[in-house]
Amino acid sequence: MESSILPTMIRLRASANSFLSQFEPLAIVVVPIVSFLIARVLQSFIQVIQERGLKATIIGFFMTLVKLVPGVKKHIDAEKQKIVDKLQSSGKSLRGDWKTELPNTGLGTRVLEQMKDFKQKDPAWQGKCSGTVYIGGNESEGHFSLINEACSMFAHTNPLHLDVFKSVVRFEAEVVAMTGALFGSKEKASGGEICGNMTSGGTESILLAVKSSRDYMRAKKNITCPEMIIPVSAHSAYDKACQYFKIKLWRVPVNKEFQADVKAIKKYINKNTIMIVGSAPGFPHGIIDPIEELGELAFSYGICLHVDLCLGGFVLPFARKLGYPIPPFDFTVQGVTSISADVHKYGLAPKGTSIVLYRNHEIRKVTSLLITEWSGGLYVSPTIAGSRPGSLVAGAWAAMLSLGQEGYLEHTREIMEASKRIQKGVKEIPELFIVGRPDMTIVAFASNIIDIFEVNDILSSKGWHLNPLQRPNR
Ligand SMILES: *Cc1c(COP(=O)(O)O)cnc(C)c1O
C-alpha cells in the first residue's frame, strides 16, 4: 500500500511543481504585494486596538459587519432620522394655544406683560444650570441690567454699514483688539499681526477658522481634498464645519488623561491634512489639551492649528495671573494659527457674541468676502452673516469695559474656588470620581458603581441642569 502511494505523491508533486513554475515570475511580484497588504491591514488593526481598546474594536468591527447585512443600515439611518424629527418637532404637543398667525389688532405695550408672564414660567436656571449661564449670585443682577441697557441703546444698529454705525464699528475693533491682547497679541512671539472679527457664537467662530484654514492651505500648499484631525473631545462644531466645507474629518481618541493624544494625531497626518485642533479646555471634561506639543506638530508639518478657547478664553488668562498653574495656550505658542473665544460665556457678554482671531492677515483675508462688481455696490463681509446685530457688539463692549481686568480677575477667582469646592464634594462621595484632572472651572464626574444617568435624573428633579456626557457613559 505504502509503496504504491509514494510514487503517486512524487508524481503529483512534480506535476504540481511544473504547473506552479509557470507562475513563478508572477509570484515574485504578487506574493510580496499580498503579504505587504496583509501586514498593513494587520498593522492598522493592531493600531486601532491600541488606540480604542480591544473591546471597542471588536464592537466596532461587529457593528460594521452588522451594517453590511441588507436592510440593517437603512434601519439604523431611519432610527437616526426619527430622533432628528422628534427633536425638530419637540414641543409640538405643547402647542395648543400657540399663535400661528398675526393677531388682527396689535397688542401694543401689553405684549410686554405677556412676555413677562411666559418668562416667569421658564425653569429657574440661575446658579443651578451647567454650560449656558456663566454668572450667578448677587452680582449678576446689576451686570445684567447694565448689559441690557447697552444692548437696547444699540438695538437698531448694524455693523455691516461701516460708514453709518461708526460707534459699533469701533466697539467691534476694540473688543477684538482687547481679546487679542489677552492671548498674547502684544508679545513678540505672536508676530504682532493678530486680527479677527466678532461672530454670533463659538460655532460661527469655529466655522470661520476652519474655512480660513482650508482656503489658506489651498492657496499655500494646493491642497484640494482637505482633511482635518481632531481629538474626540473637540466640540461638534467641527463636524458641522466639515459637513459645510467638504472636509474629511478624523476624530482621534484622547489619552488616559482625557487630553488630545499628540502621537495618535500625528499618525493621521498626510499630504491632504490642512489642520489640527486643540481645546483649552474641551467642553465635555474641562481638560486642556497639550497646546505646545500640538503647535510643534502643526509647525513642523506646515499645517494650521486652531485653539478652541470658546470656554477658556475669558478664564485662563486671568487664572494664570492669579497664580493657578495654566499651561501655554495662546498665540505665544508657535504653530497656533487661529483661536476662537466666546464672550457670551465667561466673558459675561450677551448671548450671540464670540470672537475669531487669526495669527495674521494672510490667513484671515482668504475668508473675508469682498465683492466689487455687485449692482448693489461695494460689498465687504468678514463673517457668515451679512447684517449683524450691533446691539450684541455693544453688549460685549459694555461687558468687557465695565468689568475690566479687575472684574474678570475677581470673577475668575470666585469660580475657580467654587470649582475646587465642587471637586472636594464629589471626592467625598465614595461612589463617584472626577474625570481626569480638571484644569479650569469645569468638573466632570463619573462612577464605576452606580448609573450616572440616574444620578443626573435625581439632580434634575432637584432643579440642577447638568450636561450628561457619553463615551464613556459611566
Ligand atoms: C461652547 C463651545 C463651543 C461652541 O460654541 P457655541 O457658542 O455654542 O456655538 C465650541 N467649543 C467649545 C470648547 C465650547 O465650549
Image (tube, rainbow, N blue to C red):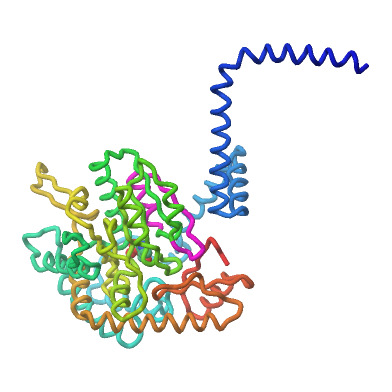
Q: Position of residue 313 (x, y in %)?
A: 30, 69
Q: Which residues, given as a range, are shown in magenta?
A: 236-259
Q: Report ligand 1 position as a quadrant.
A: bottom left
Residue 19 sits in which quadrant? top right
Q: Is residue 158 left or right of residue 254?
A: left
The answer to whether 179 is drawn above or below residue 222 in the figure is: below
The answer to whether 17 is drawn above or below residue 398 in the figure is: above
Q: Residue at x 53, y 60 (%)?
A: 471
Q: Position of residue 326 (x, y in %)?
A: 35, 73
Which one is in front, 62 or 427?
A: 427
Which one is in front, 190 or 82?
A: 190
Q: Position of residue 66 (x, y in %)?
A: 62, 43
Q: Residue at x 11, y 43 (%)?
A: 374
Which one is in front, 444 or 54?
A: 54
Q: Residue at x 29, y 67 (%)?
A: 342
The answer to whether 463 is drawn above or below residue 283 in the figure is: below
